């Protein structure tokens, strides 16, 4: 069940100024509302293009998305070869 401001129906948000509602509507996803995740990376000599490529490879394709959670769990781990288990 959805909770929080992202799940509020439009009439509940109506008291906000029209400009703010219009700006917010640009960022609203029809399924996820206003939920986002942001990552930040800092390092000397950072390979920004490599990081973007790796992260993009972790995104589900439309076909994978349509398979649901069972299908998502079958997708290979993109970070599997990069991280060593902690002992």
Image (cartoon, rainbow, N blue to C red):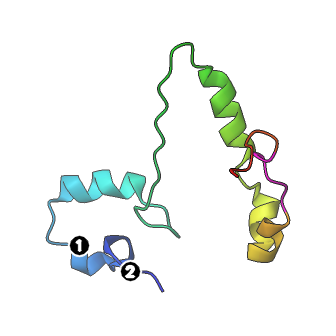
Circle 2 — which element? loop
> Residue 45 appears at what percent x and percent y?
56, 13
* Quadrant of res 70: bottom right
Comes first in the chain, label 1 or label 2: 2
Horizontal side of residue 76 vs 13, given as left or right: right
Kindly identify which numbered label has been placed on residue 21. Answer: none
With respect to residue 25, does 40 lie above or below?
Answer: above
With respect to residue 87, does 57 lie above or below?
Answer: above
* Quadrant of res 60: bottom right
Q: Residues within 10 Å of mark 1 (few under 14, many from 20)?
A: few
- In the image, 61 versus 69, the foreground residue is 69
The residue lying at 53 percent from left, 70 percent from top is 31
With respect to residue 62, does 69 lie above or below?
Answer: below
Q: Quick check: is 76 in the magenta stretch?
A: yes
Q: Residues within 10 Å of mark 2 (few under 14, many from 20)?
A: few
> Residue 32 appears at what percent x and percent y?
49, 67
Q: Residue furthest front?
A: 87
Residue position for label 1: 13
| Stretch in magenta | 75-80
- In the image, 8 versus 46, the foreground residue is 46
The residue lying at 85 percent from left, 66 percent from top is 74
Circle 1 — which element? helix
Residue position for label 2: 3
Label 1–label 2 contact, CB within 8 A: no
């Amino acid at each position: 069940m959805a909770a929080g401001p992202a799940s509020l129906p439009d009439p509940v948000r109506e008291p906000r100024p029209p400009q703010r509602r219009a700006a917010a509507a640009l960022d609203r996803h029809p399924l996820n509302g206003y939920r986002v995740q942001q990552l930040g990376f800092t390092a000397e000599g950072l390979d920004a293009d490599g990081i973007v490529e790796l992260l993009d490879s972790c995104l589900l394709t439309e076909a994978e998305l349509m398979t649901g959670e069972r299908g998502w769990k079958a997708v290979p781990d993109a970070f599997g070869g990069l991280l060593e288990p902690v002992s």
